[in-house]
Image: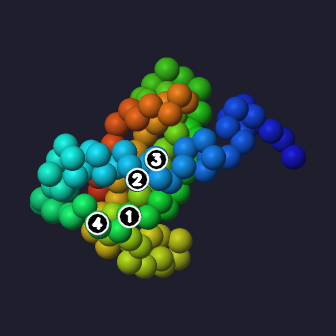
Amino acid sequence: MSTTMASIQHPSLDDWLPDSVVLQDLRAIVISSGGGKIELDSGLITISPDTNCVVVAKSWREVRLDIGLGNCFRVLVAIGGVKSVDAGVVTAVHCFCTLWYTSRRELITTDFSSVMPG
């Protein structure tokens, strides 16, 4: 089994970036800063502070060129929880939030979408 640099530095994403930290960051952005409002392509939605949020996926992205966000961690959260899973495609109750982190666990940016991002 080969070992990547990311797995050497961060043997477990759950240990290194716990769901509780991700969800705390998400709530700080949406509830504290945004007043519970999320703007989607389909319009504005409002969520309450106790809205269920589920971490769907975490990954390390290694970018070989100096483009985009560079090397970073990506976390996908289903806001409102998971409505369904059909042929590997997850549908969220309200929407998805993708949170991007540096290798030092600093939040870079977020992106909200109605459908599961690729």
The residue identified by callout 4 is: 50
The CA span between labels 2 and 1 is 7 Å
Going by the numbered disc 2, the residue's amino acid type is: Leu
- Which of the labelled discs sits on residue 53, or is there none? 1
**Residue 91: x, y in percent?**
38, 72
Q: Earlier in the sequence, mark 2 or mark 1?
A: 2
The residue identified by callout 3 is: 21
Going by the numbered disc 3, the residue's amino acid type is: Val
Residue at the spot 38% in from the left edge and 77% down from the top edge: 83
Q: Quick one: label 4, few (<14), some, or many (20+) residues within 10 Å?
A: few
Q: Is residue 66 above or below residue 22?
A: above
Residue at the spot 41% in from the left edge and 73% down from the top edge: 82
Residue at the spot 12% in from the left edge and 60% down from the top edge: 43
The residue identified by callout 2 is: 23
Q: Is residue 106 above or below residue 94?
A: above
Going by the numbered disc 1, the residue's amino acid type is: Cys
- Asked whether disc 2 touches disc 1, contact meaning CB atoms under 8 Å apart, the reply is yes
Q: Earlier in the sequence, mark 1 or mark 3?
A: 3
